[in-house]
Amino acid sequence: MDYQKMQSLNGKLALVTGAGQGIGAAIAQALAATGAEVICTDILRERAETTVRELSSMGFNVRAEQLDVTDSTAINALAESLPPLDVLVCNAGIVTNTSAEAMTDEEWDKVIAVNLTGVFRTCRGFGRRMLAAGAGSIINIGSMSGHIVNVPQPQCHYNTSKAGVHHLTRSLAVEWATRGVRVNAVAPTYIETPLLKDLESQPGLVSRWLDMTPAGRLGKPDEIAAVVQFLASEASSLLTGSIINADAGYTCI
Ligand code: NDP
């Protein structure tokens, strides 16, 4: 068995949503560093271009596209304009902290629209082309919040959206299993990214998270990127419908 070849993404075309910063930017780097041509997309073109500038300076084959994952028309148009993807990473996501009783319809709808409906629309748009080609690996970024409810942050919309991402992943995996397209998800613990900034500033919150984590630490974007790279490669050829917990043991206790 040629294990190096199994892990390589040489000659593969990949697309990452929300790749302008945080986990998405790290995923783009991991895929590019192992041989893929990577299309970095984000809701803000300038932000996707920032990632591309940085990765290009390292010699990687990357380019930027603006893409809002809630926009079916834009997703389908981009999918039609590209060859079928080998790897799709649905990473874009948002969060707010609001109690259920104070949450407005708009706040609920927005988080569900980006985190859950956006993943569905992106999988559907690019997945159609992958199915026609009979190959591909889709990786969705879920969360440990899709398994458990994180006290004390009130995020019922976010938690529900991520549980939905996990079950959408399993549903698509079953539908597409005999047609060459694998669909898996990663469920991270708290990862040090801009998304966490508001939460981190709340007194005592980080130390509480650390107390609740068996390994006693948060995660880093490149630790999620490495799991995604595995799921993108042939090294994970037997995996479909898997939700991989990358959470330093958080959901074990
Ligand atoms: P960041 O906020 O750092 O990055 C997400 C990127 O997605 C941002 O550039 C954001 O833009 C962009 N984005 C937002 N809405 C859309 C949209 N409609 N279409 C396209 N892009 C959009 O987040 P992280 O890197 O921390 O998170 C990445 C993923 O990992 C998310 O799905 C998140 O839920 C998940 N996750 C993160 C954890 C963490 O602790 N950080 C833990 C578990 C899961 P903008 O900033 O303008 O909103």
Image (spheres, grey):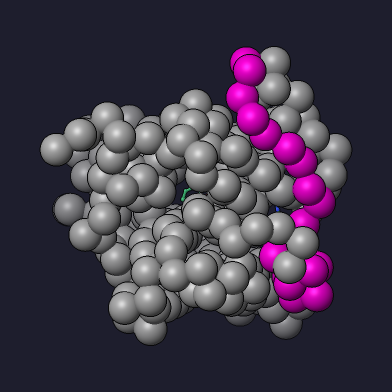
**Image location (x, y in percent) of residue 211:** 28, 37
Q: How many marks?
A: 0
**Image location (x, y in percent) of residue 49:** 79, 34
| Quarter occupied by residue 126 | bottom right
**Is 16 situated left or right of 152 in this image?**
right
- Front-lying residue, 196 or 171: 171
- Front-lying residue, 98 or 192: 192
Q: Residue at x 20, y 39 (%)?
A: 214
- Front-lying residue, 60 or 71: 60
Residue 72 visible in this rendered orientation of the protein: yes
**Is 55 situated left or right of 116 in this image?**
right
Residue most extreme to the left: 1
Image quadrant occupied by the N terminus: top left
* Magenta-colored span: 58-79
Residue 123 sits inside the magenta stretch: no
Residue 76 sits inside the magenta stretch: yes
Residue 211 visible in this rendered orientation of the protein: no
**Height in image: 84 above or below 189?**
below
**Height in image: 82 above or below 158?**
above
Q: Residue at x 60, y 38 (%)?
A: 37
Q: Residue at x 37, y 35 (%)?
A: 8
| Quarter occupied by residue 195 | top right
**Image location (x, y in percent) of residue 9:** 43, 39
- Front-lying residue, 188 or 207: 188
Q: Residue at x 43, y 64 (%)?
A: 135
**Is 52 situated left or right of 99 in this image?**
right
